[in-house]
Amino acid sequence: MNHRLYDKLSNSNPQLMREIKGRFKPAQIGLSISGSLLIQGLVLLSFLTKLPISTSNNRNPYCYPSVMYSREDRWVYDRSLDCLKDSSGNLLIGWPLWWEHICQTLSAIAIIALVIGGLFLLIENIAKEQKEGTLNFIRLSPQSGYKIIVGKLLGVPLLVYVGIAVMIPLHGFSAIQGGYFLRDLISFYGVISLSLLTIYLLGALYAIKGGQQALVFGVALGGLFCSSYLSTLQTLFPPGKFAKPTSEAIWWGLSLGMKPIYCQAFVIVSLLVLNSYLFKVIERSYQKPYATLLTKKQSYQLGLIANLYVLGFWLSGLSPTQSFVSPRFVINLLTVYSIFLLPVFLTLALSLSPNRQSLQDWARYRQTLTSEPGQPRSSLRADLIWGDKSPSVVALGIHMLMSIMTLAVAIALWKTEDIIWDSSGKLLAILGLCIVGGWLWIYSIVIQWLFLSKLSKQRWVLPVVLGVIIGLPPLVLLVLGHGSGESFPYWLMLGFGPSPFLAVNSDLLPIAVSTLLGQTLIIVMSLRLLTKQLKRAGQSELKQLIDRPAIAANRSTSASR
């Protein structure tokens, strides 16, 4: 039976069996299990020492829950009261809270071990195979890229999985004893698994694209993820007796805060969508190392989904008509969101911009089509929108329009009697969004030009350009004498656009119009220069191909003479 199961797994995913055979050794498995049991024992022992003792001062957070009282929207402990006792004089202990804290501690330990430990092992393994060339050898095998990735994700952190699996019985028991239901426990494991898959896919993508700093990347990304994620779990999975419904976090009319199950389902579905696209990205990077991370079609799909997510929150949960959101807060939040679009679009530009060789091949292809009159011409517009080897400026312009239109629709549909959000204020806010889009498109053109130039082969050029894009606006303002805090609106105007901040600073309207006209001129000139450079690259490559036979013929003629 075991032999049949082994053959079945080997045939379905040979890469997974290869990873399991290299790690499934008795000594390593025994060490992983022993370490897990030791950690669980230490956790139980530490919490046993925190229980109240009848011979000591009986003011303890684990006394019977009657010493708890409600303050505003949360429960707190009154530690000035002595522990209650039964008729026999024995202390009454709030065991559900004690088990709940054990469950939370085990959850934190498991998440940190899975994220940092598993991420380090995964990156180190892929980087090592990249360096030794075995990953290129695996690419030649008939296995699909999907199976290779799944084999790596499941097989490389196998010892970490074994250690965490040994924790599940105590973790599940402590969760049930702490007041959680089985449904909450299943949802918890689902959220953790999908979140872990997201982190692992990002780590694998980093390694496949040439990253080798496994320890630095694993600790940095894992630490950042754990520090923010552990607090998020408290919101997703609150204990039943402390849960309080709220009307906030509304998405397309659905109040995600009314019940934890709504928020959990939202997170699970969102992670499923995100991981499906990450799988496509990493599979494409594995099979085509020199291609763009995303096809333009995939980027449009992902951009449409992301904007629908954002629009659902803007229209439903952040309307100024809501009592818990002030108009000024919405303006500041939209301004921050506009600034947040900068790193998003820089990442998108890096993911969609073809390298120099691909652009030269595309330019030569277009030159060939235009030079042969008898051949049907391919649509340049369709090629720029959908072609993976064509420049990314049109595709990034489409993404820019989608993002700006999402916020513009949200602003236009808001209904409020506040003077800030009258018709003129909305027009000023939308004008600010257009300036945001102008800067984003200019930066995208710069990134694409950089990929076309010969400087793209230098590793230091890209970080320098990105640093200039982010740090140049404050530097220019400092040189011009606007170094004080009062120059914040000018910094927004010059660097990222004023966004809705312009709605409450109508005196900046002349500067905004001048900025928009200047952006239009820069975009037109940049596109013309990029078009000429592409034509020059295509002509030079085509001329080399045409001249090679002539040069070879001249050489043979000279040799025969």
Image (cartoon, grey):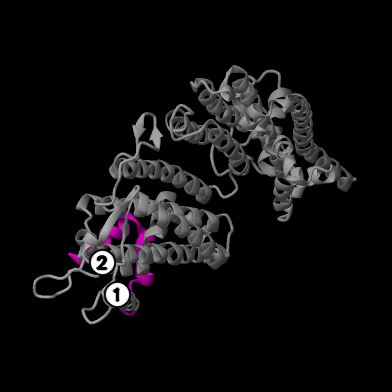
- 106 left or right of 274 in image: left
Instruction: From the image, tell me which residue sits under label 2.
Output: 98
Residue 359 part of the magenta segment: no
**Mark on residue 50?**
1
For disc 1, the neighbor class at 10 Å (few under 14, some 14 to 19, many from 20) is: few
Residue 46 drawn above or below residue 97? below
Q: Nearer the viewer, residue 433 or 53?
A: 53
| Distance from Cα at disc 2 to Cα at disc 1 | 9 Å
Q: Secondary structure at mark 1?
A: loop
Report which quarter residue 397 is drawn in. top right
- 525 left or right of 125 in image: right
Report which quarter residue 24 is drawn in. bottom left
Residue 6 part of the magenta segment: yes
Q: Earlier in the sequence, mark 2 or mark 1?
A: 1
Q: Nearer the viewer, residue 18 or 550?
A: 18
The reply to whether discs 2 and 1 touch (Cβ–Cβ < 8 Å) is: yes
Relative image position of residue 338 (x, y in whole percent)? 60, 36
For disc 2, the neighbor class at 10 Å (few under 14, some 14 to 19, many from 20) is: many
Magenta-drawn segment: 1-27
Quarter of the rendering occupied by the C terminus: top right
Q: Nearer the viewer, residue 552 or 504?
A: 504
